Image (cartoon, grey):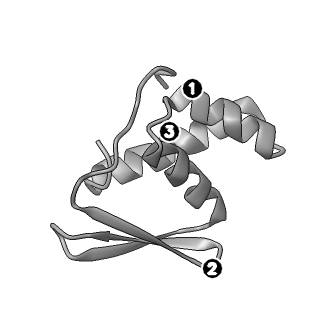
């Protein structure tokens, strides 16, 4: 993980909260995606253009999780979002 790295939401993605979850629509592919509450929180921080290191620090204060587990999970989600073209 590069702590200073900022991930940006793709211009082709629209997102809307639905209860505690969030639905993402990629206009380019026409695909819908869903995020659970923790994924929603990460997405909110990405959308606010926080560096990945700041996202980890924020989540460490909000959730009972180890730094190693959190960094691994944030990396995995960001990689999946990038693979699907939802962020860059």
- Give the residue displayed 34% in from the left and 42% down from the top: 8
- Name, please, the residue furthest toward the left: 28
In which quadrant is the C terminus drawn?
Answer: top left
Determine whether 6 is above or below 9 in the image.
above
Q: For numbered disc 2, what is the local secondary structure?
A: loop
Q: Nearer the viewer, residue 53 or 19?
A: 19
Pointer 2 or 3: first along the chain: 2
Q: Quadrant of residue 49?
A: top left
Residue 57 in the image: state x and y as whole percent: 68, 30
Residue 72 in the image: state x and y as whole percent: 59, 38
Determine whether 16 is above or below 75 in the image.
below
- Name, please, the residue furthest toward the right: 64
The residue that mark 1 highlights is 53
Residue 84 in the image: state x and y as whole percent: 29, 57
Q: Quadrant of residue 78?
A: top left
- Cα separation, mark 1 vs mark 3, equals 11 Å
- Cα separation, mark 2 vs mark 3, equals 25 Å
The residue that mark 2 highlights is 19
Determine whether 37 is above or below 67 in the image.
below
Pointer 1 or 2: first along the chain: 2
Q: Are marks 2 and 3 in contact (CB under 8 Å)?
A: no
Could you classify mark 1 by the number of other residues whose Cα lies within 10 Å: few (under 14), some (14-19), or many (20 or more)? some
The residue that mark 3 highlights is 75
Q: Are marks 1 and 3 in contact (CB under 8 Å)?
A: no
């Amino acid at each position: 993980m590069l702590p200073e790295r900022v991930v940006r939401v793709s211009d082709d993605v629209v997102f809307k909260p639905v209860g505690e979850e969030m639905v993402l629509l990629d206009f380019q592919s026409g695909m819908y995606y869903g995020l659970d509450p923790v994924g929603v929180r990460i997405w909110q921080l990405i959308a606010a253009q926080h560096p990945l290191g700041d996202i980890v620090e924020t989540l460490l204060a909000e959730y009972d999780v180890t730094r190693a587990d959190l960094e691994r999970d944030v990396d995995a989600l960001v990689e999946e979002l990038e693979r699907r073209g939802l962020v860059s």
